[in-house]
Amino acid sequence: MRLTVTELKLFLRDPASTIVTLALPVAIVVVFGVIAHPGDNTDPILTYFPTMALCLGLAQLALNLTPTTLAGYREKGILRRMSTTPMPPWRVLAAQLSIGLIVAAVAVVLVIVVGHFGFRFELPRQVPGFLAAIVLSCTALFAVGLLVAALAPSQRVATGIGVGLFFVSLVFGGVFMPAETLPPFLLDIGDYTPLGAAMQSLRASWGGTMPAPLHLGVLGGYTIVAGALAARVFRWE
């Protein structure tokens, strides 16, 4: 708990982190709310805007910021000092995941409140499905990010891998463009990526249907496999 609180303080002291993960999703909702006039439109495409904003913020935090931070700790010798304490590796990773879940919860509240009360975006209709989708989306994306952090030998390498995964995920995950406009083969590939499964699960639950078992299964698979590998191959130095 102490490690989680300390890491959260460090996160909040970094303006770039809060801007990317909290302010950017809200700004996206505001921009598209002004353009789309959702209160006067019932087109299903409108579920794309708030879910895209959430997924963009989550991916930035999980795939870019978290690997870079942990790899930087290793490079500066901070993790080596931690290794002399009784702190096991999984607790270090769990602290980062806890921060991700906290930030994600704040981002979800901001996007829903600003989108609904400011621009009349509809609220998520399938609440249990939405909660399951957002939790599994967070754990899956962070499991991948933590695996990158565990394997990357330096901060620069972690940043490069994270940025590469981020942009590839945006293309195949239906974040750059709505799924309705993507070729079928891209959709098929995106179904098996963590960001693609997250995007489709959130859109489905926002529109009123339960997320597809395939997408929830993919997210759960990434959470278990990547998370276990990250804890197993984690290196203090």
Image: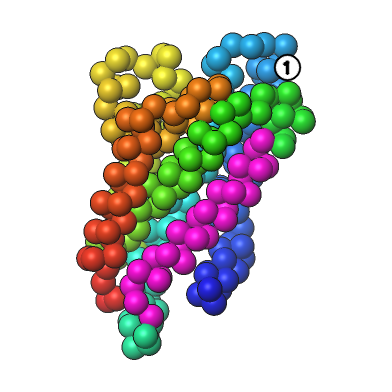
Q: Residue at x 61, y 65 (%)?
A: 13
* Furthest residue toward front: 128
How busy is the neighbourhood of tag 1: few (under 14 within 10 Å), some, or many (20 plus)? few
Helix, strand or loop for the magenta stretch, by majority: helix
Q: Position of residue 20 (x, y in %)?
A: 56, 47
Instruction: Identify the secondary structure beneath mark 1.
Output: helix
The residue tagged 1 is: 39
Q: Position of residue 145 (x, y in %)?
A: 36, 53
**What amino acid is at disc 1?**
Gly
- Camera sees residue 163: no
Left or right, 141 with respect to 21, comes to left
Left or right, 181 with respect to 39, comes to left
Judge by depth and name the residue closer to the eye, 138 or 9: 138
Left or right, 64 with respect to 153, comes to right
Magenta range: 87-112
Please, is residue 170 above or below residue 64 in the view? Answer: above
* Furthest residue toward right: 117
Please, is residue 202 above or below residue 59 in the view? Answer: above
Q: Residue at x 37, y 85 (%)?
A: 86
Question: Magenta segment: does it hold 184?
Answer: no
Q: Position of residue 61 (x, y in %)?
A: 47, 51
